[in-house]
Image: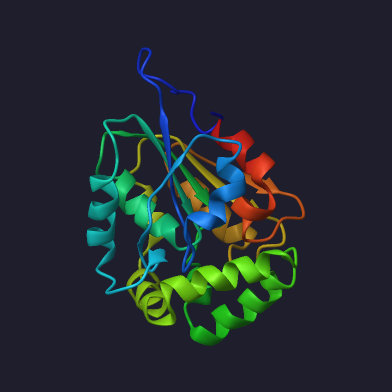
Protein backbone atom coordinates (compact mmCIF):
# COMPACT_ATOMS: atom_id res chain seq x y z
CA UNK A 1 0.00 0.00 0.00
CA UNK A 2 1.24 3.44 -0.92
CA UNK A 3 -0.59 4.85 2.09
CA UNK A 4 2.30 3.97 4.34
CA UNK A 5 5.90 2.91 4.14
CA UNK A 6 5.33 1.04 7.42
CA UNK A 7 3.26 -1.60 5.71
CA UNK A 8 3.79 -4.45 8.10
CA UNK A 9 4.92 -5.25 11.58
CA UNK A 10 7.20 -8.20 10.85
CA UNK A 11 5.04 -10.46 8.70
CA UNK A 12 1.68 -9.34 10.10
CA UNK A 13 -0.67 -8.40 7.22
CA UNK A 14 -2.21 -4.95 7.23
CA UNK A 15 -5.99 -4.76 7.10
CA UNK A 16 -7.76 -2.02 5.12
CA UNK A 17 -10.95 -0.70 6.76
CA UNK A 18 -13.27 1.67 4.88
CA UNK A 19 -15.93 3.94 6.40
CA UNK A 20 -18.55 5.26 3.92
CA UNK A 21 -19.34 8.94 3.56
CA UNK A 22 -22.47 10.83 4.61
CA UNK A 23 -25.54 8.76 3.76
CA UNK A 24 -23.53 6.16 1.87
CA UNK A 25 -23.08 2.46 2.62
CA UNK A 26 -20.97 -0.48 1.48
CA UNK A 27 -22.20 -0.08 -2.10
CA UNK A 28 -20.19 3.13 -2.45
CA UNK A 29 -16.94 1.16 -2.28
CA UNK A 30 -17.96 -1.96 -4.20
CA UNK A 31 -15.81 -1.15 -7.23
CA UNK A 32 -12.87 -0.23 -5.01
CA UNK A 33 -13.14 -3.43 -2.98
CA UNK A 34 -13.06 -5.45 -6.19
CA UNK A 35 -9.47 -4.18 -6.48
CA UNK A 36 -8.36 -3.96 -2.83
CA UNK A 37 -9.15 -6.42 -0.01
CA UNK A 38 -11.03 -4.31 2.53
CA UNK A 39 -13.65 -4.38 5.24
CA UNK A 40 -16.48 -1.83 5.37
CA UNK A 41 -17.73 -0.46 8.69
CA UNK A 42 -21.11 1.29 8.46
CA UNK A 43 -22.19 3.65 11.24
CA UNK A 44 -25.25 5.81 12.00
CA UNK A 45 -25.54 8.40 9.24
CA UNK A 46 -23.05 6.43 7.16
CA UNK A 47 -25.08 3.48 5.93
CA UNK A 48 -27.17 3.00 9.06
CA UNK A 49 -30.37 4.76 10.08
CA UNK A 50 -31.21 5.55 13.68
CA UNK A 51 -29.88 7.97 16.29
CA UNK A 52 -26.48 9.49 15.59
CA UNK A 53 -24.22 9.84 18.64
CA UNK A 54 -21.28 12.20 19.11
CA UNK A 55 -18.12 11.98 17.03
CA UNK A 56 -16.33 10.44 19.99
CA UNK A 57 -18.94 7.71 20.29
CA UNK A 58 -18.88 7.07 16.54
CA UNK A 59 -15.10 6.71 16.74
CA UNK A 60 -15.46 4.27 19.64
CA UNK A 61 -17.91 2.18 17.63
CA UNK A 62 -15.51 2.15 14.71
CA UNK A 63 -12.62 1.06 16.91
CA UNK A 64 -14.76 -1.70 18.39
CA UNK A 65 -15.11 -3.14 14.88
CA UNK A 66 -11.39 -3.27 14.13
CA UNK A 67 -9.36 -6.44 14.31
CA UNK A 68 -6.04 -6.82 16.05
CA UNK A 69 -4.28 -4.61 13.53
CA UNK A 70 -2.30 -3.12 12.02
CA UNK A 71 -5.02 -1.25 10.12
CA UNK A 72 -5.12 1.30 7.32
CA UNK A 73 -8.18 3.39 8.14
CA UNK A 74 -9.90 4.96 5.13
CA UNK A 75 -12.53 7.68 5.42
CA UNK A 76 -14.60 9.27 2.69
CA UNK A 77 -16.25 12.68 2.84
CA UNK A 78 -17.87 13.21 6.27
CA UNK A 79 -16.57 9.92 7.67
CA UNK A 80 -13.06 11.37 7.47
CA UNK A 81 -13.85 13.23 10.67
CA UNK A 82 -14.78 10.00 12.46
CA UNK A 83 -11.64 8.33 11.12
CA UNK A 84 -9.48 11.21 12.35
CA UNK A 85 -10.89 10.93 15.87
CA UNK A 86 -10.40 7.16 15.90
CA UNK A 87 -6.88 7.21 14.47
CA UNK A 88 -5.61 9.63 17.10
CA UNK A 89 -6.50 7.29 19.94
CA UNK A 90 -5.59 3.75 18.83
CA UNK A 91 -2.18 2.20 18.19
CA UNK A 92 -3.65 -0.40 15.82
CA UNK A 93 -3.95 2.28 13.13
CA UNK A 94 -0.85 2.11 10.91
CA UNK A 95 -1.92 4.71 8.33
CA UNK A 96 -4.86 6.93 7.43
CA UNK A 97 -6.32 7.82 4.04
CA UNK A 98 -8.87 10.64 3.80
CA UNK A 99 -10.83 10.74 0.53
CA UNK A 100 -12.46 14.11 -0.11
CA UNK A 101 -12.51 15.13 3.57
CA UNK A 102 -15.11 17.59 4.83
CA UNK A 103 -15.95 19.95 6.44
CA UNK A 104 -14.30 23.09 5.16
CA UNK A 105 -15.35 25.83 7.63
CA UNK A 106 -16.53 27.90 4.66
CA UNK A 107 -19.10 25.19 3.85
CA UNK A 108 -20.73 24.82 7.24
CA UNK A 109 -23.86 26.73 6.28
CA UNK A 110 -26.67 24.81 4.59
CA UNK A 111 -26.69 27.24 1.66
CA UNK A 112 -22.95 27.11 1.08
CA UNK A 113 -22.94 23.34 1.27
CA UNK A 114 -25.91 22.94 -1.09
CA UNK A 115 -24.39 25.25 -3.68
CA UNK A 116 -21.04 23.46 -3.76
CA UNK A 117 -22.69 20.04 -3.61
CA UNK A 118 -24.68 20.86 -6.75
CA UNK A 119 -21.59 22.08 -8.59
CA UNK A 120 -19.75 18.93 -7.59
CA UNK A 121 -22.65 16.63 -8.49
CA UNK A 122 -22.65 18.03 -12.03
CA UNK A 123 -19.02 16.90 -12.34
CA UNK A 124 -19.80 13.31 -11.30
CA UNK A 125 -20.50 10.50 -13.81
CA UNK A 126 -24.26 10.34 -14.39
CA UNK A 127 -24.51 6.61 -13.70
CA UNK A 128 -23.63 7.11 -10.04
CA UNK A 129 -26.75 9.07 -9.13
CA UNK A 130 -29.27 6.18 -8.88
CA UNK A 131 -26.84 4.26 -6.69
CA UNK A 132 -26.22 7.27 -4.46
CA UNK A 133 -29.94 7.96 -4.07
CA UNK A 134 -30.58 4.33 -3.10
CA UNK A 135 -27.97 4.60 -0.36
CA UNK A 136 -29.37 7.89 0.91
CA UNK A 137 -32.82 6.30 1.05
CA UNK A 138 -31.47 3.45 3.17
CA UNK A 139 -29.66 5.73 5.61
CA UNK A 140 -32.47 8.26 5.70
CA UNK A 141 -32.51 12.07 5.78
CA UNK A 142 -32.91 12.23 9.55
CA UNK A 143 -29.72 10.29 10.24
CA UNK A 144 -27.86 12.20 7.54
CA UNK A 145 -28.89 15.56 8.99
CA UNK A 146 -27.97 14.41 12.50
CA UNK A 147 -24.52 13.32 11.36
CA UNK A 148 -23.98 16.66 9.67
CA UNK A 149 -24.91 18.51 12.86
CA UNK A 150 -22.57 16.34 14.91
CA UNK A 151 -19.60 16.53 12.56
CA UNK A 152 -19.75 19.92 10.86
CA UNK A 153 -18.50 22.01 13.82
CA UNK A 154 -15.50 19.75 14.44
CA UNK A 155 -11.99 21.01 13.62
CA UNK A 156 -10.52 18.19 11.56
CA UNK A 157 -7.16 19.89 11.13
CA UNK A 158 -6.77 20.09 14.90
CA UNK A 159 -7.50 16.37 15.18
CA UNK A 160 -4.88 15.55 12.57
CA UNK A 161 -2.10 17.15 14.60
CA UNK A 162 -2.35 14.24 17.04
CA UNK A 163 -2.03 11.49 14.42
CA UNK A 164 1.57 10.28 14.26
CA UNK A 165 1.12 7.69 11.48
CA UNK A 166 1.18 8.60 7.75
CA UNK A 167 -1.92 10.49 6.58
CA UNK A 168 -2.76 10.73 2.88
CA UNK A 169 -5.35 13.34 1.90
CA UNK A 170 -6.91 12.63 -1.50
CA UNK A 171 -9.15 14.96 -3.51
CA UNK A 172 -10.45 15.17 -7.03
CA UNK A 173 -9.56 18.37 -8.82
CA UNK A 174 -13.28 18.97 -9.55
CA UNK A 175 -14.38 18.43 -5.95
CA UNK A 176 -15.99 21.64 -4.67
CA UNK A 177 -16.80 20.02 -1.33
CA UNK A 178 -13.10 19.56 -0.64
CA UNK A 179 -11.30 22.56 -2.20
CA UNK A 180 -7.57 22.41 -2.84
CA UNK A 181 -6.62 24.85 -0.10
CA UNK A 182 -8.70 22.97 2.47
CA UNK A 183 -7.16 19.61 1.51
CA UNK A 184 -3.68 21.14 1.60
CA UNK A 185 -4.38 22.59 5.04
CA UNK A 186 -5.38 19.16 6.35
CA UNK A 187 -2.32 17.47 4.86
CA UNK A 188 -0.07 20.11 6.41
CA UNK A 189 -1.71 19.67 9.82
CA UNK A 190 -0.75 16.00 10.06
CA UNK A 191 2.89 15.48 11.13
CA UNK A 192 3.31 12.89 8.35
CA UNK A 193 0.68 14.19 5.97
CA UNK A 194 0.70 14.44 2.19
CA UNK A 195 -1.79 15.56 -0.43
CA UNK A 196 -2.64 13.65 -3.60
CA UNK A 197 -4.99 15.07 -6.25
CA UNK A 198 -6.81 13.03 -8.89
CA UNK A 199 -7.11 15.06 -12.12
CA UNK A 200 -10.68 15.41 -13.36
CA UNK A 201 -12.25 13.52 -10.46
CA UNK A 202 -15.00 14.97 -8.28
CA UNK A 203 -16.11 13.86 -4.80
CA UNK A 204 -17.16 10.21 -5.10
CA UNK A 205 -13.72 8.84 -5.91
CA UNK A 206 -14.27 5.33 -4.45
CA UNK A 207 -17.01 4.90 -7.06
CA UNK A 208 -15.68 6.87 -10.00
CA UNK A 209 -11.92 6.30 -9.68
CA UNK A 210 -11.45 2.88 -8.05
CA UNK A 211 -8.18 2.09 -9.85
CA UNK A 212 -6.50 5.33 -8.80
CA UNK A 213 -7.75 5.10 -5.22
CA UNK A 214 -6.72 1.44 -5.01
CA UNK A 215 -3.20 2.38 -6.09
CA UNK A 216 -3.00 4.67 -3.06
CA UNK A 217 -4.12 1.94 -0.69
CA UNK A 218 -2.24 -1.11 -1.87
Q: Nearer the viewer, residue 211 or 198?
A: 211
Q: Is residue 144 above or below residue 13?
A: below
Q: Quadrant of residue 94?
A: top left
Q: Position of residue 75 (x, y in %)?
A: 46, 51
Give the residue displayed 38% in from the left and 81% down from the top. 142
Give the residue displayed 60% in from the left and 59% down from the top. 181
- The image's colour scheme reads rainbow
Q: Is residue 118 above or below residue 126?
A: below
Q: Is residue 94 left or right of residue 126?
A: left
Note whether residue 196 is visible.
yes
Q: Position of residue 99 (x, y in %)?
A: 54, 52
Give the residue displayed 31% in from the left and 53% down from the top. 85
**Outermost residue to the bottom:** 111
Q: Position of residue 109 (x, y in %)?
A: 48, 83
Q: Position of residue 104 (x, y in %)?
A: 50, 67
Q: Quadrant of residue 6?
A: top left
Give the residue displayed 36% in from the left and 69% down from the top. 151
Name the quadrant of the N terminus. top right
Note whether residue 162 is visible.
no
Q: How many numbered discs?
A: 0
Q: Is residue 185 above or below residue 112?
A: above
Name the quadrant of the C terminus. top right
Q: Is residue 85 left or right of residue 64?
A: right
Amino acid sequence: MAASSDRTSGQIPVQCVLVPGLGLDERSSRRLRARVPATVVTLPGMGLAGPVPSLDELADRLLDRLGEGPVVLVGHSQSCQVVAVAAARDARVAAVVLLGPTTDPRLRSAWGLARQWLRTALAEPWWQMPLVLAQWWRTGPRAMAALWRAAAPDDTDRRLRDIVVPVTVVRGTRDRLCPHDWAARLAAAAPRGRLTELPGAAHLTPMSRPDEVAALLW
